[in-house]
């Protein structure tokens, strides 16, 4: 029960890495609120874990304000905020990515981190404690061709993590990031362009451990970084990638 007595918000908690984090947090004793644009997915995970779920588009200021109000009514300012919600564009030459796809990537991957910080950092600072975890990507450290604007959004998230960590450390708030390699999640097909055995084999050949990240891999690292065991860790971008970034 490494998170016993803690409260947490997990964005994009209705599937993929986010679902894994919700399940692990709940198993570790945390009270969890899921924010997901897919209401049915959020409710499914909530029913299985004892969490609560709220439909929210975390790229929209009004939805994040509503999330903050719901969390405040349920348990006050959360001890932990996990910015997991993310999206990509389909592989394409950078100049061929449509403007609306570019805007969507930045709204979900970048703007959401700003909006949750605006909503929850004041309460954490007032309390003198808190943990923020941003789910970035190896794409922000070792970019792949044809995913230029997704790569850039995750690079932004890594830099934002370090900037937030430096600024919030005097207030007792820790900020870290996880950098998974592509995993068995709903976004895998979007990363690969097409989910075929040949495409999987080609990508897996770049991962020394020879497999994709799983939700359980990311969840285990998330529990650690958000627990007191990581009390001296802030500003890191931890690679959970089977060695891909070596």
Image (cartoon, grey):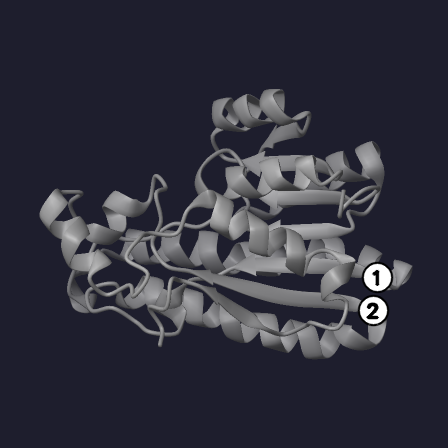
Marking on residue 172 = 2
Q: Residue at x 54, y 38 (%)?
A: 13
Picture quadrant where residue 137 is located: bottom left
Q: Is residue 199 left or right of residue 22?
A: left
Q: Position of residue 48 (x, y in %)?
A: 59, 22
Q: Is residue 109 left or right of residue 211?
A: right
Camera sees residue 12: no
Q: Which of 239/157 is in front?
A: 239
Q: Position of residue 8 (x, y in %)?
A: 71, 44
Q: Position of residue 220 (x, y in %)?
A: 57, 50
| Earlier-in-chain disc, 1 versus 2 | 1
Relative vertical location of residue 142 with respect to residue 96 in this rendering, above or below: below
Kindly state the secondary structure of the residue where label 1 is placed: loop
In the picture, the quarter occupied by the N terminus is: top right
Dots 1 and 2: beta carbons under 8 Å?
Answer: yes
Q: Position of residue 156 (x, y in %)?
A: 47, 71
Marking on residue 129 = 1
Camera sees residue 192: yes
Relative vertical location of residue 68 with respect to residue 166 in this rendering, above or below: above
Q: Residue at x 25, y 68 (%)?
A: 144
């Amino acid at each position: 029960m490494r998170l016993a007595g803690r409260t947490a918000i997990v964005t994009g908690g209705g599937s993929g890495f986010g679902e894994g984090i919700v399940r692990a947090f709940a198993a570790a004793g945390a009270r969890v609120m899921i924010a997901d644009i897919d209401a049915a997915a959020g409710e499914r995970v909530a029913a299985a874990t004892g969490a609560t779920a709220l439909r929210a588009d975390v790229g929209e200021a009004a939805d994040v304000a509503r999330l903050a109000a719901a969390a405040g009514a349920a348990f006050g300012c959360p001890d932990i905020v996990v910015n997991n919600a993310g999206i990509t564009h389909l592989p394409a030459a950078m100049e061929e990515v449509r403007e609306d796809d570019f805007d969507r990537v930045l709204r979900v991957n970048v703007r959401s981190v700003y909006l949750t910080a605006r909503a929850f950092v004041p309460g954490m600072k007032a309390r003198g404690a808190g943990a923020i975890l941003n789910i970035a990507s190896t794409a922000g450290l070792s970019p792949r061709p044809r995913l230029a604007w997704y790569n850039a959004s995750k690079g932004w998230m890594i830099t934002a993590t370090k900037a937030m960590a430096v600024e919030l450390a005097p207030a007792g708030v820790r900020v870290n990031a996880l950098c998974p390699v592509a995993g068995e999640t709903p976004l895998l097909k979007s990363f690969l362009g097409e989910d075929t055995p040949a495409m999987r084999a080609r990508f897996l050949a770049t991962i020394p451990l020879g497999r994709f990240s799983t939700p359980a891999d990311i969840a285990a690292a998330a529990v650690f970084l958000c627990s007191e065991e990581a009390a001296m860790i802030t500003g890191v971008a931890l690679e959970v990638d089977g060695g891909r970034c070596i």
